[in-house]
């Protein structure tokens, strides 16, 4: 156990040295590191709990997605049957499906064929699953039921997540934040992590808003108060104003132009009143639709509706033909700016709900770093003193091995671009405990072998070979626990699992190679007559 | 220089005789811990219960908790707890989960921010909605179960089944007692606590495996030594290592406990209890003597190899 070939010794020292060197960028100023090649720049990333920032988990509202799909399906059924001139009745959304009754039984099979075209194969170009978007069944009395299949809903939710991620990215980037992380979590969730934010309120407003903007007509055929009494016409709905007090408006469900047809939106000021406003411009088709609608409705009010709230309901004084306009309505400079950001980035395909938020202010983060450092230094100092008191020279060897071990942990963490969290620091401190244990196991075994009457070199040799098997066994169990933690944990807990796991690997490496090499070198130089422990 | 020797050479404590005391004590403690869990309960943090946690720091001297409590009480948020957190400027506010799903939690935070205004620094805001908290709890429980199972399988491969079973009984015992400790102290039970429990599991097994390793070695070497003597010898031979290791781990934990700050306080306190107190006791007084009952080493004289499958006595 104590004999190393030159090559082997060199390989061990080199490995340890290289791994340790990867830790170096963490301790140098950023400017200095910036000029290095990319692979050498890898460093440990501070977790949000240490550098401050917001972690926000959003979920796509699957119910809303399904509702919208069903409503679209209902409209499609109406269009198909009308185009085919098939009489129908009782077209409605029921539960997870759309139902329609064909007036004349003779037309039922033709209707089914036509409606069958609405069911599309799933899976896009790959399309090998054979699943379709709809289940169409014939019920008695010429009733046709079109149900959304689960894969179809799942597919749409997935698409919604993808689109939402792009839109959120655009919105967050407009805020000018550094290195935001936006990624999918599971099937219907999006994780947004933004470091270094003092107050996430604005961030949440920006990413949480659906920002669905519609231009619709106000129904002036009856006052909104009368409609509120319970007689809302079927093609209308009651929407309230964004401004206080909340005024009800009777708004047509039909959309003249939607926000999707905007090409640009910028904050500005009204030239007369000097109030903050949002200036917008439509694309060609939007401009044409808007021009036509305003031409037909001069003198009537229309409403600008954002997420089912009326921002303003101005009267059309003259046709707007140029394709650009202005939204005014009790904005502040910031809210006008935010609305422009939202309109430029586009609407979310489905509403998102914040289901988890964790924000740490920069002050707490800095405190945590300081506390982590203090406790690490104090812990290390106590362990070093205790080891020297217990094992003397061998204690010094152990301390050297443990110090290299810690440096290697930082090296590996840098290499992995791992995130260091406060529990992660605790993990490193605990690893020091494990690393020390591997040395204790070896030394105690050597002591025993000496007591058993072996010569010093013999005892050291036997001590190593017997202790190493135990070290491997005992560390694998802790490693299993760390692996499970990594698998189930999120955020800080995962950070703990990573440092613990990496620490175990470096500990086993050090025990098997470096500690052995250090003591072998010592034996080779000193040819000891007795073991000093 | 004389070196420190905490444990003298060649100790001959009769650990196995203690099993007549340690087993009943452990059984009683476990029952006590389980009943504590059911009747006293754990202080579930927002990770598992849902709700909001806000840590604030007063910008002007020590925080006036009474005044803050009064102003938050008017918001109609149900149960709101305020508590000093470390230095007198820092206050931890806990708001129970609001009825009305995920969005309602966000409304609560906005209300609190409105009520406390700009007099304070918001050091930490954590909001966990009802669905996430349910998921996190099930992940935690599944994770713990998975870890125990994976380790059991590993030990079964590496040792005989009796060892795997013995280690398992010992470590479930550790977890149960630690949960009892968490119930008594009402330490926040959150994701970090699951991390603590898993680490305790890992450490405690680490210890048990070191002693089992020695027992296996002794079984191969002394084929005629009576089992209690053999176990005693194994524990005594590894005693010095156990003590030294636990002193170093305790030193590291002590540093974390004293200087690590409030955020990891409950984590280190739990670890201190689980690793240092329970873990050590278990590997010596439970994990080793239980091998006698599990039938390790009976009828060794008749065999040539180490431990093999043995007829039940």
Image (tube, rainbow, N blue to C red):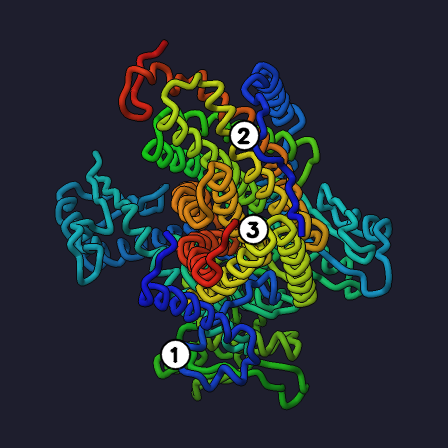
The label nearer to you, 1 versus 3, is: 3
Q: Nearer the viewer, residue A244 or A526?
A: A526
* Other-residue count near label 3 (Cα within 10 Å), few / some / many at <14 / 14–19 / ≥20: few
Q: Secondary structure at mark 1?
A: helix
- Residue designated by label 2: B236
The residue pinned by badge 3 equals: A532
Kindly indicate whether the residues beneath marks 2 and 1 are on one polypeptide chain: no
* Tag 3 and tag 2, C-beta contact below 8 Å: no
Where residue A414 appears, x then y in whole percent? 46, 68
Q: Position of residue B183 (x, y in %)?
A: 66, 32
How far apart are the two marked residues, 1 and 3, measured between alpha carbons? Answer: 88 Å
- Circle 2 Cα neighbour tier, 10 Å, few/some/many (<14 / 14–19 / ≥20): many
Q: Earlier in the sequence, mark 1 or mark 3?
A: 1
Badge 1 crowding class, 10 Å Cα cut-off, few under 14, some 14 to 19, many 20 or more, is many
User: Which residue is denoted by mark 1 in the rendering?
Assistant: A286
**Residue at 74% from the left image edge and 58% from the top image edge:** B56
Which of discs 2 and 1 lies nearer the camera? The answer is: 2
Between the residue at mark 3 and the residue at mark 2, the CA separation in whole angstroms equals: 22 Å
Answer with the quarter of the image where residue A454 lies.
Answer: top left
Left or right side of B255 for A111 = left
Cα gap from disc 2 to disc 1, whole angstroms: 86 Å
Residue shown at 83%/55% (left/top)?
Answer: B88
Horizontal and vertical percent position of residue A359: 61, 60
Q: Nearer the viewer, residue A295 or B313?
A: B313
Left/right placement of residue A450 relative to residue A314 reads left
Determine whether the residue tagged by mark 2 lies in a helix, strand or loop: helix
Residue placed furthest toward the front: A529
Residue A89 in view, yes or no: no
Q: Is B266 situated above or below B40?
A: below
**Identity of the residue drawn at 66% across and 45% down:** B4
Q: In which quarter of the view is residue A241 placed?
A: bottom right
Nearer the observer, A417 or A302: A417
């Amino acid at each position: 156990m104590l004999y190393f070939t030159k090559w082997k010794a060199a390989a061990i020292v080199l490995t340890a040295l290289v791994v340790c060197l990867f830790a170096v960028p963490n301790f140098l100023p950023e400017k200095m590191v910036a000029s290095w090649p990319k692979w050498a720049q890898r460093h440990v990333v501070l977790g949000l709990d240490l550098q401050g920032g917001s972690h926000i988990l959003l979920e796509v509202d699957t119910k809303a997605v399904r509702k919208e799909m069903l409503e679209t399906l209902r409209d499609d059924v109406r269009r198909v049957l009308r185009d085919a001139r098939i009489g129908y009745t009782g077209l409605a959304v029921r539960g997870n499906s759309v139902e329609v009754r064909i007036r004349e039984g003779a037309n039922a099979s033709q209707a089914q064929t036509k409606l069958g075209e609405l069911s599309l194969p799933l899976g896009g170009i790959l399309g090998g699953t054979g699943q379709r978007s709809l289940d169409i069944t014939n019920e008695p009395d010429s009733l046709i039921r079109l149900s959304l299949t689960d894969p179809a809903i799942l597919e749409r939710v997935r698409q919604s997540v993808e689109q939402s991620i792009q839109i959120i990215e655009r919105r967050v980037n407009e805020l000018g934040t550094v290195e935001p992380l936006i990624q999918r979590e599971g099937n219907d969730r999006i994780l947004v992590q933004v470091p270094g934010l003092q107050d996430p309120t604005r961030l949440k407003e920006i990413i949480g808003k659906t920002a669905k903007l519609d231009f619709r007509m106000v129904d002036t055929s009856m006052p909104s108060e009368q409609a509120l009494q319970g007689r809302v016409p079927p093609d209308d709905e009651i929407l309230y104003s964004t401004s206080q007090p909340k005024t009800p408006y009777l708004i047509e469900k039909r959309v003249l132009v939607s926000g999707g047809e905007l090409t640009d939106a910028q904050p500005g000021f009204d030239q007369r009143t000097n109030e903050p406003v949002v200036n917008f411009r439509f694309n060609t088709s939007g401009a044409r639709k808007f021009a036509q609608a305003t031409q037909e409705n001069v003198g009537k009010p229309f409403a600008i509706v954002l997420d089912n709230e009326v921002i303003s309901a101005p009267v059309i004084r003259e046709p707007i033909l140029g394709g650009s306009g202005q939204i005014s309505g009790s904005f502040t400079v910031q809210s006008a700016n935010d609305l422009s950001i939202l309109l430029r980035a586009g609407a979310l395909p489905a509403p998102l709900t914040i289901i988890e938020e964790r924000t740490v202010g920069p002050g707490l983060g800095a405190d945590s770093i300081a506390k982590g450092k203090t406790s690490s230094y104090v812990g290390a100092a106590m362990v070093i003193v205790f080891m020297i008191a217990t094992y003397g020279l061998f204690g010094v060897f152990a301390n050297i091995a443990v110090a290299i071990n810690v440096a290697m942990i930082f090296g590996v963490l840098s290499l992995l671009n791992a995130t260091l969290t406060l529990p992660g620091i605790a993990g490193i401190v605990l690893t020091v405990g494990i690393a020390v244990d591997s040395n204790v196991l070896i030394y105690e075994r050597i002591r025993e072998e000496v007591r058993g009457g072996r010569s010093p070199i013999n005892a050291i040799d036997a001590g190593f070979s017997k202790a190493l098997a135990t070290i491997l066994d005992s560390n694998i169990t802790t490693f299993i626990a760390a692996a499970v933690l990594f698998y189930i944990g999120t955020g800080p807990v995962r950070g703990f699992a990573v440092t613990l796991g990496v620490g175990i690997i470096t500990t086993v490496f050090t025990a098997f190679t470096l500690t052995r090499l250090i003591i072998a070198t010592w034996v080779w130089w000193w040819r000891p007559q007795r073991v000093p422990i | 220089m004389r070196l420190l020797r905490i444990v003298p050479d060649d100790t001959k404590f009769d650990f196995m005789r203690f099993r007549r005391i340690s087993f009943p004590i452990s059984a009683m403690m476990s029952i006590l811990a389980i009943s504590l869990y059911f009747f006293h309960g754990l202080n579930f943090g927002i990770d598992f219960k849902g709700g909001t946690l806000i840590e604030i720091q007063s910008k002007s001297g020590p925080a006036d908790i009474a005044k803050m409590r009064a102003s938050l009480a008017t918001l109609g948020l149900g149960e709101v707890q305020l508590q000093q957190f470390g230095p007198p400027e820092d206050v931890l506010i806990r708001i129970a989960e609001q009825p009305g799903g995920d969005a309602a939690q966000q409304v609560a935070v906005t209300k609190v921010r409105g009520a406390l205004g700009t007099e304070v620094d918001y050091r930490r805001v954590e909001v966990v909605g009802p669905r996430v908290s349910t998921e996190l709890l099930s992940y935690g429980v599944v994770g713990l179960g998975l870890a125990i199972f994976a380790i059991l399988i590993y030990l079964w491969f590496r040792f005989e089944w009796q060892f795997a079973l013995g280690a398992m009984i010992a470590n479930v015992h550790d977890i149960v007692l630690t949960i009892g400790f968490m119930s008594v102290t009402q330490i926040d039970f959150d994701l970090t606590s699951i991390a603590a429990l898993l680490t305790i599991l890992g450490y405690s097994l680490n210890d048990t495996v070191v002693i089992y390793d020695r027992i296996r070695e002794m079984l191969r070497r002394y084929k005629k030594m009576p089992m209690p003597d053999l176990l005693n010898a194994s524990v005594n031979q590894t005693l010095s290592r156990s003590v030294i290791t636990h002193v170093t781990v305790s030193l590291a934990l002590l540093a974390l406990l004293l200087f690590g700050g409030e955020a990891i306080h409950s984590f280190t306190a739990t670890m201190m209890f689980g690793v240092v107190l329970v873990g050590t006791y278990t590997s010596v007084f439970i994990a080793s003597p239980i091998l006698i009952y599990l039938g390790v080493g009976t009828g060794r004289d008749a065999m040539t190899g180490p431990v093999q499958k043995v007829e039940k006595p």
